[in-house]
Amino acid sequence: MNDVKKNPDELGALWTKQSARGDYMTGTINGEPVVLFKNDRKVEGDKQPTWRVLKSKPREERETVARPHPGSNDDLDFWILR
């Protein structure tokens, strides 16, 4: 039996992982599966976030999503994890 009481302030949990493209985190926030990526466009002292939080998608959807063209003006960078 699990006698550990859940902290009422807890929103979720995250795990750090590594891929060929760098470190990232996976987990849940308020029961929603999420994936967090480090913002590689962050410049020290600016107001951009250090980490970006995206809804996690099932593997079938992730593999069919097109990656933005490098150098495009697309505001979001999406990684496909395999």
Image (cartoon, rainbow, N blue to C red):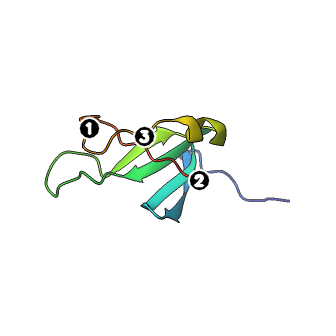
Between the residue at mark 3 and the residue at mark 1, the CA separation in whole angstroms equals: 10 Å
Q: Is residue 7 left or right of residue 25?
A: right
Q: Is residue 51 left or right of residue 42?
A: right
Label total for image = 3
Is disc 2 in contact with disc 3, using a CB cutoff of under 8 Å? no
Q: Amino acid at mark 2?
A: Arg
Question: Residue 73: x, y in percent?
Answer: 23, 35
Categorize mark 1 by other alpha carbons within 10 Å: few (<14), some (14-19), many (20+).
Answer: few
Residue situated furthest left in the rendering: 45
Closer to the camera in the image, 71 or 27: 71
**Residue 33 location, quadrant:** top right
Between the residue at mark 2 and the residue at mark 3, the CA separation in whole angstroms equals: 13 Å
Between the residue at mark 2 and the residue at mark 1, the CA separation in whole angstroms equals: 23 Å
Instruction: Identify the disc placed on residue 82.
Output: 2
Is residue 10 in view? no
Name above or below for residue 65 compared with residue 39: above
Q: Residue at x 50, y 55 (%)?
A: 25
The residue labelled by disc 3 is: 67
Q: Amino acid at mark 1?
A: Ser
Circle nearer the N terminus (2, 3): 3
Q: Residue at x 47, y 64 (%)?
A: 20
Closer to the camera in the image, 56 or 3: 56
Q: Amino acid at mark 3?
A: Arg
The residue labelled by disc 1 is: 72
Closer to the camera in the image, 10 or 35: 35
Question: Residue 40: x, y in percent?
Answer: 29, 54
Closer to the camera in the image, 18 or 10: 18
Q: Quadrant of the N terminus?
A: bottom right
Circle nearer the N terminus (3, 1): 3
Question: Residue 45: x, y in percent?
Answer: 13, 55
Circle nearer the N terminus (2, 1): 1
Disc 1 element: loop
